[in-house]
Image (cartoon, rainbow, N blue to C red):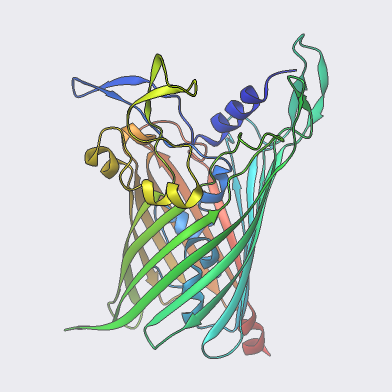
Amino acid sequence: MKRLLVIFSCVSFLLNFSYAQNTEEWNGQQATQNTITTAVPFLNIGPDARSGGMGELGAGTSPDAMSQHWNPAKFAFIEKEMGFAVSYSPWLRKLVNDINLAYLSGYKRIDEYSTVSGSLKFFSLGDITFTRDDGSVIGIFRPSEFSLDGAYARKFSEKISGAVAARFIYSNLTQGQEVSGQSSKPGTSIAADVSFYYTTPLEVNWLEGSEFSFGAAITNIGQKISYSNDEFDKDFIPTNLRIGPSWLMEIDDYNSVRFSLDLNKLLVPTPPVRSDSLVDDNNQYIILAGKDDNVSVAQGMIQSFYDSPSGFSEEMKEIIWVVGAEYWYDKQFAIRAGYFHESEMKGNRKFFTLGAGLRYNVFGLDFSYLIPTAQQNPLANTLRFTLTFNFDGFEAQQ
């Protein structure tokens, strides 16, 4: 049977979140790619079309039914009493038609200050044929991953709110097959999110009704995950820091524009540069630059701010920045655009996004479209959509 590493490599290729470490030339200088890879990278994939149309951001934007992924603290300021949304994203549609990401999210206001919410994210890798070392077929399986979470958001004042979330993660990539004489198992983990949201009205001369907001969230703070019984063979999950401001300008009674910025950084250790031949007393390859990445989750989060082999300049390259804009007409029709930028050294994901949205009483429908600029993307030239339901709309109709 093919080795487990091969399977994981194929999965990473499908996700397009992991890249081999190699040397490339940029602007006449040699630079080494040193991307940070984790298990279950699907946790950080933006699931909804509204945020997807603005470049994949959502830390400080206005609250909606999909806030669970980006910043659940926003739910404390949501105007509706209850709602939910479902989103669907085809994956690698140009190559296969059975890989997709589905997301279901909902919320319910408890009182004036508190809101509870939850979501389910499911990633299907489609049909994959498992074979033995001699090439004989074992069978056709459908690996998949999912996460299930719940959150509690509370308003601390008229301008500030916070939230905590708990998440269960399940990743079944090998379907329990034996690999090189060692049994494999689904990987599981427990994680938590902590988030913050601030919003305040702005008096900007003729722009009455303008609003400034700011959000921050640390997501997927949790234990390492393993696909075998080896306690030392564990990988970090993608703990992520997301912060960003958002500015809403009410032009008049019918027209408004929102500008937003998100900054993202993985809070996991950066791979060090190791010797190809020299080993230490523990028979481990000597670290030439950077720090040991075999550390605890807490140590890895702290270390992630200063452990890059190339120093501060590389740390800055680990920050992903996203800018986006959203225009609404009469709060019923929206047009969106955004740009996502990741350093060439850390993965080189760069793309523009376009989107549109419609709202009518009970229902809302959002679309997004991704245009890569640096390399191919699993969502390139793919239309994603999100359908939202507002239960307040039912009462209004009645």
In the foreground, 272 or 372: 272
Furthest toward the top, the residue is: 134
252 is higher (above) or lower (below) than 37: below
The answer to whether one can see residue 80 in this image is yes
Q: Where is residue 189 in the image (x, y as percent from the top left)?
A: 64, 51
**On the picture, is 241 further left or further right than 365?**
left
- Quadrant in the picture for the N terminus: top right
24 is higher (above) or lower (below) than 119: above
Q: Position of residue 15 (x, y in %)?
A: 55, 36
350 is higher (above) or lower (below) than 26: below
- Choose top left, top right, bottom left or bottom right for residue 281: top left
- Choose top left, top right, bottom left or bottom right for residue 365: bottom right
Furthest toward the left, the residue is: 205
Furthest toward the front, the residue is: 281
**On the picture, is 290 further left or further right than 167?**
left
In the foreground, 55 or 271: 271
The answer to whether one can see residue 78 in this image is no
- Choose top left, top right, bottom left or bottom right for residue 200: bottom left
Residue at 47%, 36% in the rendered image = 377
Q: Position of residue 340 (x, y in %)?
A: 36, 47
Residue at 62%, 43% in the rendered image = 225
**On the picture, is 356 further left or further right than 41?**
left
